[in-house]
Image: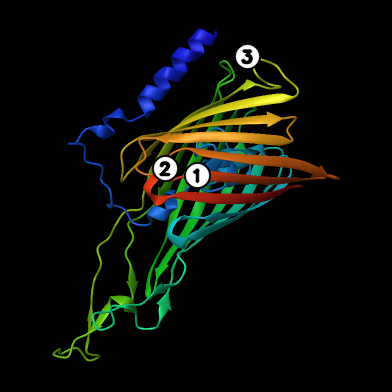
Amino acid sequence: MIYRISIVCSLLFTMLHGQYRDLPDVVTKVATAAGNWLKLETDARAMAMGGAFVAAGRGVSGIPYNASAIAYLSGSELVYGKSSYIAGITHNVVSYGRRLSGSDFFGLHLFYLDSGPMAVTNEFYPDGTGEDFRALSMALRFTYARRLTDRLKVGGSLNYIRDEIYTTLMQTIAFDLGSNFDTGIYGFVLGMSISNFGPEVQYHGTGLQQTVPDTIDVDGRLLRVTEDFPLPLLFRLGVSNDILGKTSIFKKSDIHRLTVAVDGLYPSDYTVYTCIGLEYGFKDLVFVRGGTHFGHDTAGFSVGLGTLVAVGSTKIAVDYAYVDYGVLKTTHQISIGLKL
């Protein structure tokens, strides 16, 4: 049995690794989509596991990876997460979900990115005009999921997306779809999702206007018309397995749990890359996590810790993640959640 699982994992890893990325003639399609911040990984638990969360995600933290993740809720859940990203950039997440009935679930997920203050410059004041501006990005997801059977869950999100840079603005609507299926084969869970499916976008605003002295326009301004760009469509396919734990096919344990997750990602503006994550849990109280990326241009290994403490009928989760982005240095994330 172990031999068969090893073969399956090896084949899946080979398929998803995207080994052709190292070939010099491959067209990666980098910088062909708008709103690349929509591909940023969120939540300390997911990031500590290398972003391998399309099959392993549970609850509201899994919404950006797979909308069907909220179909695992037993009640209500509220999570706040903050990330100290590169170059002074921060992003925050607030998410809430609840079980509406035995098979219906609803969730809200707000992602907010702030570049921090930057100096406004122009050809006359290259060192700054004394005015500051920020790049602010937001994605608000309204998510519904349904448990079709005891093994199959599906979900979808309606996303309001907004990107504001100084006096220019882009806003649009997009959709996410996802499913989670317990295969019943050696404990493997299969997850699939497609994110950021929507129309092409265009930036507008006064920042695209320029005063022209010799013009016949009434207001004396020239308007720059920007090109339309697609959103970064992202397809995820992954598996997870509790190789040790209460429900494990391989080794039963009421004290220890070890989860392995592997995701393959195919973005519309890059080549295929892979995420692998591990999570060890002791008595569902203390957690140690690790993960890595293969084929990604910057993201490398990640590690993290977590704890889940019961206070009466409420459970409080605190998670931390450390991620290495190579030449872009390292980042720190923390998430705090309440399970009601």
Residue placed under numbered mark 1 in the picture:
323
Name the residue at 56% across, 16% down. 185
Quick one: label 2, few (<14), some, or many (20+) residues within 10 Å?
many
Lateral position of residue 117 relative to residue 189, left or right: left
Query: Observer-nearest residue: 288 or 111?
Result: 288
- Tell me if label 1 and label 2 are in contact, CB under 8 Å: yes
Quick one: label 3, few (<14), some, or many (20+) residues within 10 Å?
some
Disc 3 from disc 2: Cα separation: 32 Å
Report the amino acid beneath label 3: Phe
Quick one: label 1, few (<14), some, or many (20+) residues within 10 Å?
many
Residue placed under numbered mark 2 in the picture:
299
- Tell me if label 3 and label 1 are in contact, CB under 8 Å: no
Mark 1 and mark 2 lie on one chain; the one further toward the N terminus is 2
Lateral position of residue 84 relative to residue 167, left or right: right
Query: Observer-nearest residue: 116 or 61?
Result: 116
Name the residue at 34% across, 60% down. 201
Helix, strand or loop for disc 3: loop
Report the amino acid beneath label 2: Ala
Q: Which mark is residue 250?
A: 3
- Residue 111 appears anywhere in the view: no
Disc 1 from disc 2: Cα separation: 7 Å
Query: Observer-nearest residue: 65 or 333?
Result: 333
Query: Observer-nearest residue: 56 or 303?
Result: 303
Counting from the top left corner in percent of width and height, residue 175 is at: 45, 50
Lateral position of residue 318 relative to residue 274, left or right: right
Counting from the top left corner in percent of width and height, residue 77 is at: 70, 48
Name the residue at 21% across, 41% down. 27
Counting from the top left corner in percent of width and height, residue 166 is at: 39, 74
Q: Is residue 62 above or below residue 239?
A: below
